[in-house]
Image: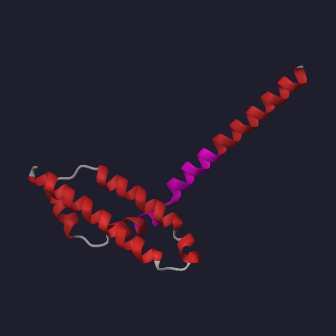
Amino acid sequence: MTKIEKMKEKFDNKIEQEYKEWLEALKQCTPEVIIEKCYEKVTKEEMIYNLKGREYTIEELKALLKAHGILAECYDEWLKSDGNFNELLEYAVETRVDSIIEEFKEINKKGRER
């Protein structure tokens, strides 16, 4: 295993550990708080996937390995720029609703033709 591969593995483990610790703390919360944190949980899971999927230089990995609370910082940054997610969500909802309506119209049209 190369030096960069070892560093990448260490970084991946660090991110997973941060998430596990956050999740363990979340388990100690009330059901209401846990429900409120569902969005954060799913978002952090996607962030882990993204962080682990990227390629880094040795210098970048050194910086990331020294950093604390990477997932928390990424999540806070995400909350500041959440518009993109809302746009994607709105697009998906509009597209699917439009398809449902069109399918309904086609079914009714075929029913009247009989």
Q: Residue 6: x percent and y percent?
A: 14, 56
Q: How many marks?
A: 0
Tell me if 47 is positioned left or right of 40 in this view: left
> In this picture, which residue range is highlighted in magenta?
77-93
What residue is shown at x 72% (from left), y 38% (from top)? 100
What residue is shown at x 88% (from left), y 20% (from top)? 113
Q: Residue furthest top?
A: 114
What residue is shown at x 64% (from left), y 40% (from top)? 95
- Asked if the magenta segment contains residue 85, the reply would be yes
- The answer to which of 21 and 82 lies nearer the viewer is 21
- Against 57, residue 41 (above or below) is below
Tell me if 71 is positioned left or right of 105 in this view: left
Residue 77 in view in this figure: yes
Q: Quadrant of the C terminus?
A: top right
Instruction: Answer with the quarter of the image where residue 33 lies.
Output: bottom right
Instruction: Answer with the quarter of the image where residue 17 lies.
Output: bottom left
Q: Residue 44: x percent and y percent?
A: 42, 62
Residue 73 in view in this figure: no
What residue is shown at x 19% (from left), y 70% (from top)? 66
Q: Residue 82: x percent and y percent?
A: 50, 60
- Against 27, residue 46 (above or below) is above
Q: Residue 43: x percent and y percent?
A: 46, 60
Instruction: Answer with the quarter of the image where residue 108 lies.
Output: top right
Name the colouring of the figure: secondary structure
- Asked if the magenta segment contains residue 47, the reply would be no
Tell me if 100 is positioned left or right of 91 in this view: right
